[in-house]
Amino acid sequence: MNISIGKEEEIYLIGIEGDLDASSCINLDKAISEAVSAGEKKILIDCTNLNYISSAGLGVFMSYIQDFENNKISMVLFNLSKKVKNVFQILGLDELIQIVDSKEAAKTLINES
Amino acid sequence: MSVKGYFQLYLIISIVSWLALVVGDLLTLYSLSHVFDFYLTDFWRNALLTSFFLFTFLLFKINIGQKKSSNFIEMLWQVFIFGATTILISLLVKFMLFLFGTPVFKKNLLFNNLIYHFNIALVTVFLANGFYVWKKMILYQKSKQLNMIWLLFELLALLSMLSNFAYFDIFNFKIYLYAIPLFLFGMILSFNLKWVAFLNYKQKWQSILLIVLIIVIGFTFLQQIYEQHFGTILIIDLAQNLFIGGVSSFILLNCFSALLVLLFNLPTSSVFEQKFGEVMIFQKLSQSIQLGNKEDEVHEILIDSSLSTIFANAGWLEIVDEKGNFKAFINKGISEIDVFEIKKVLRKNHFNIDNQPQYIKDAKSLEHSERIQKLPFKSLLIIPLYSHKQKLGTLVLLKNETDAFDKEMVDIICSFVSQASIAIKNFRLIDEAVATERYQEELKIAKEVQKSLLPQSLIFNINLQITAFTKAADEVGGDYYDFYEYSDKKIAMVIGDVSGNGTSAAFTMAQMKGVFQSLVQTEIPPDEFMVQANKALGRGLEKSSFITLTFLSIDTENQTIEIARAGHCPALFFNSQTGEISYLKSKGLGLGIIRNKDYSKHIEKKKISYNKGDILILYTDGIIEAMNESGEEFGFDKLKNLLYIHHGLNTKEISNLILEKFYEFTGTQALHDDYTFLIIKFV
């Protein structure tokens, strides 16, 4: 799995590529926690190339839900494959995490909040 | 016969021979002056003497042969003690005679010969002891050739006992025909003094002292023998005995040659000793693991050896663990506060003490050294410990003189450090291996626990066909299912998946079972069950862990199913009346994702009616997400189609069919997740 980090204006962009499983999820956790400690308030996660997500990967997103709420940080995931999106939906995470189809939609959504 | 048996046999023969000799000789002498007719023939006398010599020597051959070969001082000490004791005894007898003996008594032939026989015994034992002790010393680290020479010499020496049977005058030239080769062999052997090299300085002095004393004792014996040779009429006279003469000259020759070698070796001894000490330290370091020491002991050995080898005045050793965290600190000859001050000065001068050996010739000339002016130390040697580019620590040695470390010292300390680094690394590797082993053991236990949490039998009173299948992946997984039968008309069941694997998943599952078994008793509705379970489990769960769960109760009287889904894969339902097949999707968030009151907003209960012939399949994501070789997932559609085609079969047959198709799909792929399913057919 690969993590790419970018910055577009006020938005912190994390791209995930490949399989997000028990062994690789620690990298994502690191990337997000770095963004949080750097004081970023708007985080976009690019899931275009995210092929698979395991429960450990879901655990990473889940563990930030409360933190983000408390610190007024917003996070939006975009461009999930049908398979990956389904995993989020089954677990019910789609109700707690903002998931949209495109980068533009994600930007619009995050700038509104 | 055992060695001990031989020893006892030789001892008895030697004592008996001597006693027979004494009694025989005294009776012979007695019969000369009395009307008494007994005399020992020369042949028997010589035979007894030879037997006494031979078996006494054999006795010591066994006795000394068994001793550890490297304790030279102890062996020399033994020779000395024995010689000194016998000399003392004989001197005491002489003294007593001098004080109390009447002139007649002193001239008494019988008495003199009795005393002389005692002398024979003492001299023989002294010589036998000395002879075999020298054998041990000479043959220390022997070559094959040397061994051969010794064997020849020993044979020749023992054969010379036979000369007892022939009368030789000491001035007879024939005796030299035999004595010369014996002497030559003895000479060759006496140059083999390898053992001297293995003594340290102190031991060499001890050896010199002991050898001098042994020489004195040897001469005292000889002096006594010759004194009596000229002073008394003797029935046996050792002064003319080729064997005794040969052996005693051999021993004395060796004593003199050893004495010379020892004296010449004394000056170089300390250098040799130091090198030898260094080798021993290496050995100590490299063997510390086999000897069952701890890593701490390696630290101690390293700093102690380093300090003593180069005579440093003080030093300290810092050891860090794999993550670079401080692990151990040993300071010798310097206080912790002073260490701290010195390190501060080094840091201010930008010495990087972590990466490469550093040598500071005069620490007091460094900048900012005010704080250490009071300390006696001037030169500093800093050597980091490394193994495979991983830093293990730093060794610092201090001396009171400026520029006090020469290149040789630095080299030897560097090699100590690298040897110690290897030892420390090995210790850590072993610890790691032990930890892995323990982890495997834990997994085994967790697997057992997990297995015991699942229902052992699926026999119910309720009129339903139920088949369950579960299989854990290689490691411990987190799939769980359970039942609770309220009556023959109502049953509750649960299927769930704890995120993550391993030991913690197994214990979360155990909690899950506890929560299920206690909540289910109250006939709680499924959605309320989830809210309560979320509350109960949320407290103990790790921050990034969650549980997915489906809980349902079946009422066969009213033919209804009440079901709630908490993030779990939706149940598959086949309606036999309409032929419709669908996943029972409903809103439902996994347990432990939000751990406050808001959870109840994210869960809902669904109630459906069923008819005879309907089928419900509950399963975990291990079934859906299992991949084949080309990375495709088994998926929801395949499961759906399978049930659609085979809904006519009973649950056991459906289960077998699903498994068959499942394995056909995944092929030889190793499965990374547990997979579990429950099939319920309403009849």
Image: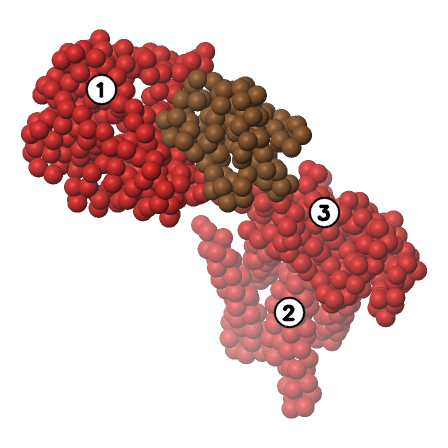
B564 with respect to B309 (left or right)? left
Q: Which residue is mark 1?
A: B573
Which is closer to the viewer, label 3 or label 2? 3
Amino acid beneath label 1 = Phe
Q: Residue B39 in the image: x percent, y percent?
A: 54, 67
B392 with respect to B453 (left or right)? right
Q: Residue B643 in the image: x percent, y percent?
A: 23, 13
Q: Look at the image and tell me in which quarter the C terminus of chain B lies.
A: top left
Q: Quadrant of residue B28?
A: bottom right
Q: Which shade is chain B?
A: red
Amino acid beneath label 3 = Leu
Q: Secondary structure at mark 2?
A: helix
Q: Residue furthest right?
A: B365
Q: Residue B158 in the image: x percent, y percent?
A: 64, 52
Q: Which shade is chain A?
A: brown
Q: Residues within 10 Å of mark 1 (few under 14, many from 20)?
A: many
Q: Earlier in the sequence, mark 1 or mark 2?
A: 2
Disc ID at residue B631: none
Amino acid beneath label 2 = Phe
Q: Do badges 3 and 1 share one subunit? A: yes
For the residue pair B649 and B209, the one nearer the viewer reads as B649
Q: Residue at horizontal 40%, vertical 22%?
A: A86
Cα separation between marks 1 and 2: 103 Å
Cβ–Cβ under 8 Å for marks 1 and 2: no
Cα separation between marks 3 and 2: 53 Å
For the residue pair B562 and B384, the one nearer the viewer reads as B562
Q: Earlier in the sequence, mark 3 or mark 1?
A: 3
Q: Which residue is mark 2?
A: B82
Disc ID at residue B385: 3
